Image: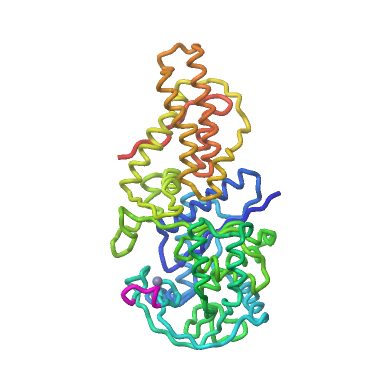
Amino acid sequence: MNKFFVTTPIYYINDVPHIGHTCTTVAADIVARWHRSLGEEVFFLTGTDEHGQKVAEAAEKQGLDPKNYCDKIAPTFENAWRNLNISFDHFIRTTDPRHKEVVGRVLQKIYDNGDVYKSKYEGWYCLGCEKFLTESDMVNNKCPLHPAEKTVWKSEENWFFRLSKYVPKIIELVEDEQANYIFPEGKRSEILAKLKSGVKDVSISREQVKWGIPTPWDQSQTVYVWFDALLNYYSATQFLEGKSQFWPANLHLIGKEIIWFHTVIWQAMLLSARLELPKKVDVHSFYMIDGQKMSKSLGNVISPQQLVDLFGVDGSRYLIARSFPSENDSDVGVGRFSERYNADLANNLGNLVSRVAKLALGRKVEKKGVKGDREFGELVDQLKLDEAIGWVFGKYIDASNSRLNSVEPWKLETNDPKRVEVLDYCIDNLIKAAVDLAAVMPESAKIILDCFEGEVKALEKGLFARIK
Ligand SMILES: [Zn+2]
């Protein structure tokens, strides 16, 4: 049986789940469900990143021990994903002792291979990103992603990883058409240019951060939170029973702000530890909220729960996927979501289902064992979720609605061949659409299939009622 391992980033626990996390997680779930529908054995991993200075500070502010703080926050992510019907197989937390053990083991291997040395590091550090910034990263002496955060000057003795040693190999991989692992193309060329402009070694440990995994060969330092976090993808396959064959991952899904870590540093770490490399890293852009960057200070942050309250589980999943920021930032907002929900789900799909169910009530339907469409699956695999859904709607839903409106079967006798023909056509289309859309809207797809497969039954209640 084919194996398929898909991951989301593990989300930094100092935040609360918002639409940005939601977008990556829903996309990964659609990919996971699609691959399961192909009969593959899927392992879908998500979780939380729980170490680092910022977590320790947040815990202190609440008067909590860092571990207690993490125990309090991690479930908010896990529950958010359960409420969105996310079918993850494991929720990893980097404070899990089993993860820590694997991190120690892999880092020791990197050390034993001669890829770690001690050196002094000085520079501007963004607490929000938990990373050193170069002058060119900064805007007005601040991190552009965290303008509200303090950027601090840090100077310390750290353990360094020989990243530069692996750059030629990584350039070769990025340029190799066969091995090429960075999607989309625009991101691949961006990384290639950065790799060719010169890469320095990176520090792998922290002297002053206590809340972390001790460096195996030097207990006075802790592992830099990013090295700890990246290793989650591998560690879960090692400490969970029966998962070791899932490494290397087939797909890491990430947002563009963490591309360097996932397409360069992660590869170098694995090369150094003599582990296999992930097959593909798909990089997506951000949501803009009504034309503006999402930010706490603007008060325009949308939470997954807010979406579920407004649009239901499947409605939220649909809207997220339909506006997925594949290559470019995607402008969304509650108003725009409501319009889209009413147009696509209430008026188009929902209305079609209830009209056809009513007109064809009691009809025997032969179709069984319909398989998903290859065209849809290919678009899903390229994370072109908007196009994938658009393809299904165009081919099956819009086509049915327009045939229905031109034939007007409600004006014809029950046995009129034209009426029979158009209803068969619509039922056939709805079944095919539901099979594809099951990855996006699992519950609604099931309702549609239950309604039309075997014998047409009445819908117990409307699908996607209009919202105001
Ligand atoms: Zn930052």
Whole-percent x, y for residue 239 in the image? 65, 66
Q: Residue 466: percent from the left, percent from the top?
A: 35, 36
406 within the magenta span: no
Give me the residue at 55% from left, 71% from top. Answer: 265
User: Does the magenta portion include 138?
Assistant: yes
Q: Is residue 100 above or below residue 177?
A: below
Q: Position of residue 38 (x, y in %)?
A: 63, 43
Q: Examine the image and state in which quarter residue 163 appears.
A: bottom right
As displayed, is residue 48 above or below residue 367?
Answer: below
Q: Is residue 414 visible?
A: yes
- Indicate the quadrant containing the C terminus: top left, top right, bottom left or bottom right: top left
Residue under the image location 51 percent in, 37 percent down:
445
Q: Where is 143 relative to 311, above or below?
A: below
The magenta-colored residue range is: 135-141
Q: Position of residue 71 (x, y in %)?
A: 48, 68
Whether residue 45 is visible here, answered yes or no, is: no
- Residue at (50, 85) in percent of width and height: 207
- In this rendering, the count of numbered labels is 0
**Is residue 336 or residue 364 the one in the foreground?**
336
Q: Nearer the viewer, residue 24 or 178?
A: 178
> Which quadrant of the figure shows ligand 1?
bottom left
Would residue 139 be found to the left or right of residue 189 on screen? left
Front residue of 362 and 427: 427
Q: Quadrant of residue 124?
A: bottom left
